Image (spheres, helix red, strand yellow):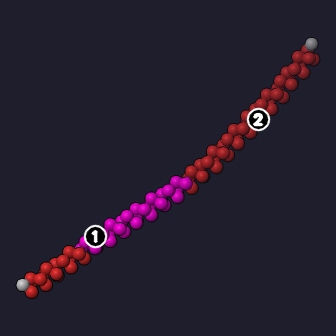
């Protein structure tokens, strides 16, 4: 009986080792997947930030062009008005 009990304990200990090894492998695989996902999300974030910065720059450029055009219009209108007054 003692021999059977010892054999059962050894088999149980071996089974626990296998379970622990399997759990460790699963956790390592999940960790690797998380690292891969993190890298992917960081790349996506960088891309989105670049797109945001590009859009902001285009907006600022368009805004500046609009201000320049408005100023040009005001100056031209002033010249036309002055020319009209000179004629009158």
- What is the chief secondary structure element of the magenta stretch? helix
Quadrant location of the N terminus in the rendered image: top right
Does 53 lie within the magenta span? yes
For the point 91% across and 17% down, the residue is 4
Element under disc 1: helix
Label 2, on which residue?
22
Instruction: Give the left or right position of residue 26, taking residue 68 as reference.
Output: right
Sequence-first disc among 2 and 1: 2
Outermost residue on the left side: it is 88
Element under disc 2: helix
Q: Which residues are magenta?
A: 44-71
Q: CA distance from mark 2 to mark 1?
A: 67 Å
Label 1, on which residue?
67
- Where is residue 19, by image quadrant? top right
Q: Is residue 23 above or below residue 9?
A: below
For the point 76% across and 35% down, the residue is 22
- Residue 12 in the image: x percent, y percent? 83, 24
Instruction: Give the left or right position of residue 64, taking residue 5 as reference.
Output: left
Q: Is residue 38 above or below residue 56?
A: above
Q: Residues within 10 Å of mark 1 (few under 14, many from 20)?
A: few
- Residue 13 in the image: x percent, y percent? 82, 26
- Residue 27 in the image: x percent, y percent? 69, 38
- Where is residue 57, by image quadrant? bottom left
Q: Is residue 77 above or below residue 29?
A: below
Q: Nearer the viewer, mark 2 or mark 1?
A: 1
**How many circles with numbers are drawn on the protein?**
2
For the point 64% across and 49% down, the residue is 36
Quadrant location of the C terminus in the rendered image: bottom left
Q: Residues within 10 Å of mark 2 (few under 14, many from 20)?
A: few
């Amino acid at each position: 009986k003692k021999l059977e009990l010892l054999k059962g304990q050894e088999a149980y200990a071996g089974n626990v080792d296998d379970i622990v090894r399997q759990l460790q492998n699963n956790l390592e695989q999940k960790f690797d997947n998380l690292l891969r996902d993190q890298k992917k999300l960081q790349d996506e974030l960088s891309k989105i930030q670049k797109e945001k910065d590009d859009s902001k720059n285009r907006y600022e450029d368009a805004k500046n062009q609009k201000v320049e055009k408005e100023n040009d219009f005001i100056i031209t209108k002033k010249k036309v008005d002055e020319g009209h007054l000179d004629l009158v």
